[in-house]
Amino acid sequence: MNIDKKRNFRELGGIKTTNGRVVKKGLFYRSGALGYMTQEELEVVKGLGIKHILDLRSKKEIESLPDPVIEGADWHDICAFTDENGVEKDLSPEGLQKLIEEGASRHDISRFVMRNLYAGLPFHSAAYQNLFGMLEFEETPLLFHCTAGKDRTGIAAILILLVLGVDEKDALDDYMMTNVYREEMIEASLAKCKTEEEGQTVLRREGVVLENAVHAIECMRKEYGDLETYFLKEFELDSEKIKRLRELYTEEDA
């Protein structure tokens, strides 16, 4: 696919499930903001037959860098993360940097990212509920993205993969691929760091840290006991609905 890797654009198709099947290709695409793409890259996206684009960013982020129009695709903007008062949070790399600068210390932002952001992302999310509604009504192919395609998008991808029967480790491996796709940006920022602590902040800002996603899944289990109950309570997906989703979106591994 002729799209620069730093756009963090990729699909979930081909990832194996625990029962020997694979996620079907050409249905689920994840990305950073489309506004960063060149016209040539956008032409590639336009050729994928995408029906829906789910923009997980805050309105402030969208106003700063609007998505270009993708003919044939319906565009939905539903912020994937708000605070306890319903205020949208800017979780772009720039937004995270602002939180760092506002914090009393580097430790404060680490605690925010781990305990507040990732602990809250999987719960009561209108964006993710909308996403699973699209799956149930067979509204694919679809593309979901935030600014960097890593945190909000990363959790969305993990949820899709888990509900389709992908092993937790493999879902986390896909999450961590962000650091491969955004390596150029990460390395450029790391080169400016003077301490290991600064380097950890860069990874959270420009890339992803495994423990954050692991923490999110642990919070799902802590809240509901197991992932099956999580999907039932958060998205009204019972065992029969999950079975249907797996029939729709996975296939025998060729």
Image (cartoon, grey):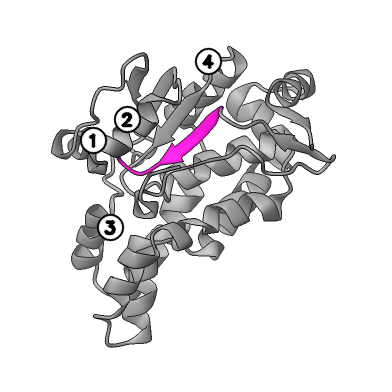
Q: CA distance from mark 1 to mark 3?
A: 28 Å
**Label whose residue precedes the other's in the sequence (2 or 3):** 2
Q: Which class describes the residues within 10 Å of circle 1: few (<14), some (14-19), or many (20+)?
A: few
Of residues 217 and 203, the one nearer the viewer is: 203
Q: Where is mark 2, residue-wise?
A: 43
Tell me what residue is drawn at x 34 percent, y 73 percent: 187
- Secondary structure at numbered mark 3: helix
- Secondary structure at numbered mark 2: helix
Q: CA distance from mark 3 to mark 4?
A: 32 Å
Q: Which class describes the residues within 10 Å of circle 2: few (<14), some (14-19), or many (20+)?
A: some
Q: CA distance from mark 1 to mark 4?
A: 26 Å
Q: Which residues are magenta?
A: 27-33
- Secondary structure at numbered mark 1: helix
Residue type, mark 4 in image? Glu
**Label whose residue precedes the other's in the sequence (3 or 4):** 3
Residue type, mark 2 in image? Glu
Q: Residue furthest right?
A: 19
Tell me what residue is drawn at x 76 percent, y 29 percent: 251
**Label whose residue precedes the other's in the sequence (1 or 4):** 1
Q: Where is mark 1, residue-wise?
A: 39
